[in-house]
Amino acid sequence: MDKMIFLLSEGLKNLWRHKLTAFSAIFSIFLTLTVAGSLIIVSDNTGRIIEYLRDKYKIEVFFKQNISDDQIVKIVKEFKSIPGVRSTTIITKADAKKIFKSQFGENVLDIVGYNPLPASCVINLVKEQENKLNIRPIIDRLRKFSEVDEVNYQGRLINRIETTYQNFVKISVILLIAILIVSVLIISNTVRLTIYAKKDLIKSFQLVGATRLFVKAPFILEGIFHGLIGALISSLLLFSCLTFGSGFILSVTGLKIHYSFLNLLFLLSSLGVVISFLGSNRAISQFLK
Amino acid sequence: MIQFDNVSYTYEKGGGVSNVNITVQDDEYVFLIGPTGSGKTTLLRLAYMELLPKVGRIVVNKYDSSKIKPKKIPYFRRNIGMVFQDYHLLNDRNLFENIALPLHVMGFQKDEIIDRVTESLEEIGLESKSDHYPNELSGGEQQRACVARALIKDPDIILADEPTGNLDPVTSFELIKLLEEINREGTSILMASHNYNLIKGRGHRIIEIQNGIVRKS
């Protein structure tokens, strides 16, 4: 326990002892996390937008004239088992007649003497899906039903939205990974400067019988403190920007930006700790090789 | 006990030691003497296994250089105290913290660390300077602090590499006497020096090394 307290206090004292390195490392982490945090907030909110759009996707299936309501109920149950289908709404011939009347103000029976409107089913698609929502297999399955006369859907629009969203997700992930790798390398090189400046300390630790882990621990803990401080500053900045900017964004675009300070702090702190752990561990491990 | 069996070590750019066969018994005080560059420091570095011999083996207590695993070396060093010409004290911490360092490494409890370091500072006569930083101490005081740091963990062996190299004759003599006291309490000492006048006539065995070869033991 006392050993742990000693290592923790060494890590904390090192923040003060290596002020310049600490400042550089914290600043690097702050920049990285601010960019990464912005990207995460944008991705998260884009996810909400795509969910909203997917909620609006619908496929209309028209049945042949001779299919009874009971048969339709059975077929629609089968529709529900198709992967990608979230919900279904049956519109019987009687319902269609009512809709016609509500929209055109006249009874279709009075016009043509019988009800020519087909029964149909509106299919809504899943919205909480990470991958691209591919509508084509669903359409193909629906068309295979002999009772189905016609399938209407907004294929081109859905495809364009889904492709754009997937490209956005891919670019975000690549960008995020690139930023994280670069920041690990920057932190590693920054910490390496400290290590070279502190090689006497490392030598002394080794001469008095410190294990490799004991030598590494203060540098890694110092790195983790850098990560936490950088994350806190970055979270505060992003939170302030979102607090003051979300009203403006709402008034200009109509989009409400969703965010939570605690989630942001937790996420960025985790990222900061991981980045700084990897960076400082890389630097000290290379030195002790 | 320190035992060198046919030990040879050559640096990449030349120099080193060749075919060394020496033994330092328990409780013995041995001087290692030779001119600068003769291989004294190399022998000490081999003794605390900072260097591992390319030929032969070194046995220190139960640890054998030909068999020791790298992760065991820190534990082996915990039974060895080291004193250097340039002290190797850490300038960013005070005297107390410098002497306490080995005890932190070995996982001692806080109370015991305070007791041991306080006692050690009294033994070397620096109790009033416990909060001084190394650059606020004289060379002699720094070297005594270095001895205290080596002794704080009750080592079986002390390896001293030119500990009087930066000290004036009077302080050097006092340091030798301090090490003799430590030796009388049962700690083996192997001390390298190039100053024959300082060590002659003190009744301890002298090993002479020249150009990496032990001439006389």
Image: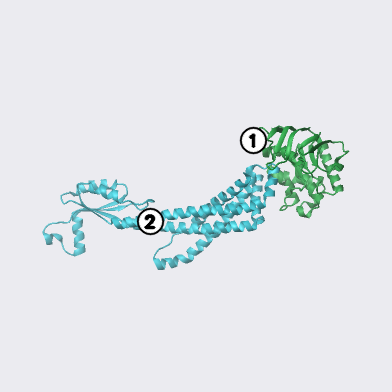
Chain colours: A cyan, B green
Q: Residues within 10 Å of mark 1 (few under 14, many from 20)?
A: few
Q: Are marks 2 and 1 on the same chain?
A: no
- Residue B148 lies in quadrant: top right
Q: Residue at x 66, y 45 (%)?
A: A2
Please, what is the three-letter code of the amino acid marked with disc 1? Lys
Chain letter of disc 1 in the image: B
> What is the x, y in percent for residue B52?
68, 37
Q: Tell me the element at label 2.
A: helix
Q: Is residue B74 visible?
A: yes
Label 2 belongs to which residue?
A165
Instruction: Reply above or below: A112 against A285.
Output: below
Q: Residue at x 86, y 45 (%)?
A: B173
Question: Residue A92 versus residue B36: which sits nearer the camera?
Answer: B36
> What is the x, y in percent for residue B85?
78, 46
Q: Residue at x 38, y 58 (%)?
A: A49
Outermost residue on the right side: it is B201
Q: How many marks?
A: 2
Q: Tell me the element at label 1.
A: loop
Q: Quadrant of the C terminus of chain A?
A: top right
Please, what is the three-letter code of the amino acid marked with disc 2? Tyr
Q: Residue at x 39, y 55 (%)?
A: A167
Question: Which disc, if any, is residue B69?
Answer: 1
Q: Is residue B1 visible?
A: no
